[in-house]
């Protein structure tokens, strides 16, 4: 059995203190288990905050390095995911502040505010057409989420995408549960409004028929009419 496989079996019961103890002792397999266990959620949190996949990945790596350096300070007052999520957010907000300073503009989000994404993955049994449709829908949702203010975007990701409870989300973001509820409700409302607007615009173009389509049908019909007229004119009179 490999080290990481052993770690998976050892930590299957979710003993976070044992995970931390082994990481402090220099067990790399334990730290690898920790990263693999939380990678998807933490990446989505970073992606929702930074709105850039490459930046989010860099921020996640930096947060993991910070976690490795400071793991001895983990006391177990919160879950490891909550602790890691705060490190990720700190890294993301630091990057936002530095970017804002470089652009000499006032940041639109301060370090105490927070945000939500629905991920849709194609099933193996899906046809290529369905897979393409899912990818297009996912891309649309991601664009719409990127347009949301960050305070709503992060909450939506944690609640709707990762399906964290209100309590867990509040702990991760260090905000009141009532704030989580109100931001999640507002995020969903804004998302629905934005998608509805796009659907309204798209409805006007449903089964669009004009331009080249119109020209082609007209030309084909006229061609056939001309051919029929020619046949009629060449037919002997009775």
Image (cartoon, rainbow, N blue to C red):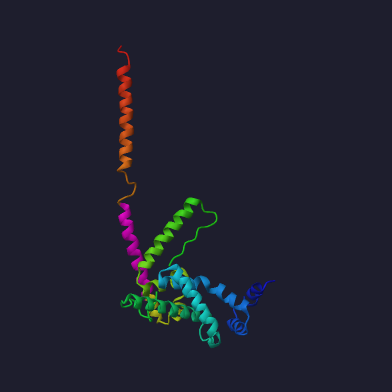
Estimate the x, y position of residue 149 in percent, counting from the top left: 35, 72
Q: Quadrant of the N terminus?
A: bottom right
Task: Tell me, yes or no, if residue 79 can be seen here.
Answer: no
- Left or right: 228, with 48 as reference point: left
Q: Quadrant of residue 23?
A: bottom right
- Left or right: 169, with 205 as reference point: right
Which residue in the rendered view is the most extreme toward the right? 1
Estimate the x, y position of residue 75 in percent, counting from the top left: 54, 88
- Left or right: 71, with 178 as reference point: right
Whether the magenta-drawn stretch holds residue 218 is answered as no
Q: Nearer the viewer, residue 48 or 68?
A: 68
Q: Which residues are magenta?
A: 182-203
Q: Quadrant of residue 154?
A: bottom left
Q: Is residue 224 above or below residue 102?
A: above
- Left or right: 156, with 17 as reference point: left
Which residue in the rendered view is the most extreme toward the front? 102
State the residue at coordinates (42%, 57%).
136
Task: Tell me, yes or no, if residue 126 can be seen here.
Answer: yes
* Count of residue discs: 0
Estimate the x, y position of residue 187 in percent, counting from the top left: 36, 70
Which secondary structure class fits the magenta region best?
helix
Estimate the x, y position of residue 109 in percent, counting from the top left: 35, 77
Q: Quadrant of residue 14?
A: bottom right
State the residue at coordinates (44%, 79%).
91
Whether the magenta-drawn stretch holds residue 187 is answered as yes
Which residue in the rendered view is the most extreme toward the top? 238
State the residue at coordinates (33%, 49%).
206
Q: Quadrant of the C terminus?
A: top left
């Amino acid at each position: 059995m490999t080290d990481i496989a052993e770690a998976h079996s050892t930590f299957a019961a979710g003993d976070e203190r044992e995970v931390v103890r082994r990481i402090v002792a220099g067990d790399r397999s334990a730290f690898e288990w920790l990263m693999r266990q939380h990678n998807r959620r933490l990446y989505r949190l970073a992606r929702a905050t930074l709105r850039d996949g490459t930046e989010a990945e860099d921020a996640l790596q930096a947060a993991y390095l910070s976690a490795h350096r400071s793991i001895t300070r983990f006391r177990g007052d919160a879950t490891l995911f909550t602790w890691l999520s705060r490190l990720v957010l700190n890294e993301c907000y630091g990057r936002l502040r530095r970017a804002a300073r470089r652009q000499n503009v006032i940041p639109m989000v301060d370090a105490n505010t927070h945000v939500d994404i629905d991920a849709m993955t194609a099933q193996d049994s899906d046809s290529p057409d369905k897979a393409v449709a899912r990818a297009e829908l996912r891309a649309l949702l991601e664009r719409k989420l990127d347009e949301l203010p960050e305070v709503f975007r992060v909450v939506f990701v944690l609640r709707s995408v990762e399906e964290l409870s209100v309590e867990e989300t509040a702990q991760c973001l260090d905000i009141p549960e009532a704030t989580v509820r109100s931001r999640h409700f507002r995020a969903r409302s804004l998302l629905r409004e934005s998608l509805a607007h796009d659907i309204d615009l798209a409805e006007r173009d449903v089964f669009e028929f004009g331009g080249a389509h119109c020209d082609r049908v007209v030309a084909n019909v006229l061609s056939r009419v001309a051919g029929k007229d020619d046949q009629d004119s060449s037919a002997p009179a009775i």
